[in-house]
């Protein structure tokens, strides 16, 4: 039986722009075989939308709490929904 696919949407705040946060998030998502995107928002936060098995999405969420070495994550807001299956890969978008 195939695991149910879920969607995670995360808003990461803190020192998360200009520190390769999106590129590192993509590396983590690709390692976990997730699809979706990471992008900077105008308010200085980073939005991450990822789809895949919930167990792997939870691993990504744990990573997002820390981020890459140069980042300083102040808060992480996560919401869950059913996967839309609209993505073929994980990308950094603008």
Image (cartoon, rainbow, N blue to C red):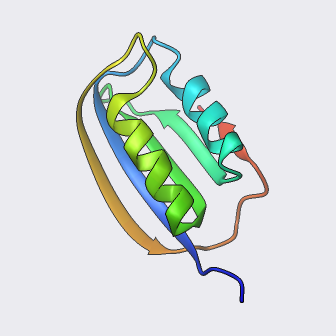
Extreme left residue here?
Answer: 74
Q: Position of residue 81 (x, y in %)?
A: 44, 74
**Which quadrant of the figure contains the C terminus?**
top right
In this rendering, the count of numbered labels is 0
Instruction: Tell me the residue at 53%/72% (across/down).
Output: 6
Q: Nearer the viewer, residue 58 or 73?
A: 58
Instruction: Tell me the residue at 55%/33% (across/down).
Output: 25
Q: Position of residue 71 (x, y in %)?
A: 37, 16
Residue 26 in sight here: yes
Side (left or right) of 61 relative to 53: left
Instruction: Tell me if residue 16 comes above or below residue 55 in the rendering.
Output: above
Instruction: Tell me if residue 74 comes above or below residue 85 in the rendering.
Output: above
Instruction: Tell me if residue 25 comes above or below residue 61 in the rendering.
Output: above
Residue 93 in sight here: no
Side (left or right) of 38 relative to 43: right
**Which quadrant of the figure contains the N terminus?**
bottom right
Q: Position of residue 33 (x, y in %)?
A: 71, 52
Q: Nearer the viewer, residue 89 or 29?
A: 29
Instruction: Tell me the residue at 39%/68% (across/down).
Output: 80
Instruction: Tell me the residue at 76%/50% (across/down).
Output: 89
């Amino acid at each position: 039986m195939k695991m149910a696919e879920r969607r995670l949407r995360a808003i990461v705040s803190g020192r998360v722009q200009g520190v390769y946060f999106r590129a590192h998030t993509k590396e983590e998502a690709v390692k976990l075989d997730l699809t979706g995107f990471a992008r900077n928002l105008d308010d200085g936060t980073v939005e991450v939308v990822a789809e895949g098995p919930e167990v792997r999405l939870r691993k990504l969420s744990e990573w997002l709490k820390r981020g890459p070495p140069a980042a300083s994550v102040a808060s992480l807001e996560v919401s869950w929904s059913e996967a839309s299956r609209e993505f073929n890969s994980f990308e950094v978008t603008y």
